[in-house]
Amino acid sequence: MTRILLVEDERDVRLIMEHVLIDGGYQVDTTDTMASGQELLGSRHYDLVIADGRLPDGTGMAVADKAQARGVKALIVTGYALSMPGELLDRYEILMKPVRPTELLEAVAQLLR
């Protein structure tokens, strides 16, 4: 089964995204900080990382960088894409918040192909 790491600091958003992904047939681990996301990446195998762009202790891009260094694909979900530097927008797949469930599942399926 495909395993996804979801790093999202907003509890309600995290729960909704987690349930959408589980309903989509994915195994999901969740956490709410950059540090714990990086720690989980170092201790378990993931097929995809989905990370919020802004986290209380850093950025989702830092988690995505670690994921990509391990050969794991990454998706950034943020409400701040328009204020992100262009090189970050080019480096990652990005979804704008609020994310519709169908959008999330389509982006995940496309990245995992």
Image: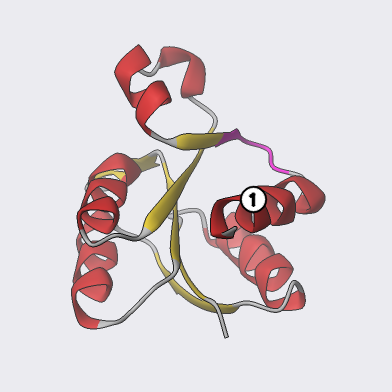
Of 57 and 19, the residue lying toward us: 19
The region drawn magenta spans 95-99
Of 8 and 42, the residue lying toward us: 42
Residue at 56% from the left image edge and 60% from the top image edge: 112
The answer to whether residue 25 of the structure is visible from this angle is: yes
Circle 1 is placed at which residue position?
Answer: 110
- In the rendered image, residue 75, in percent from the top left (x then y), is placed at 48, 47
Q: What residue type is labelled 1?
A: Gln
- In the rendered image, residue 48, in percent from the top left (x then y), is placed at 45, 63
Place residue 88 in its image quadrant.
Answer: top left
- In the rendered image, residue 21, in percent from the top left (x then y), is placed at 67, 69
Question: Is 73 displayed left or right of 79 in the figure?
Answer: left
- Residue 45, relative to residue 76: is it above or below? below
Residue at 72% from the left image edge and 66% from the top image edge: 20
Question: Is 15 displayed left or right of 91 in the figure?
Answer: right
Which quadrant of the rendered structure holds the C terminus? bottom right
- Residue 14, relative to residue 85: is it above or below? below
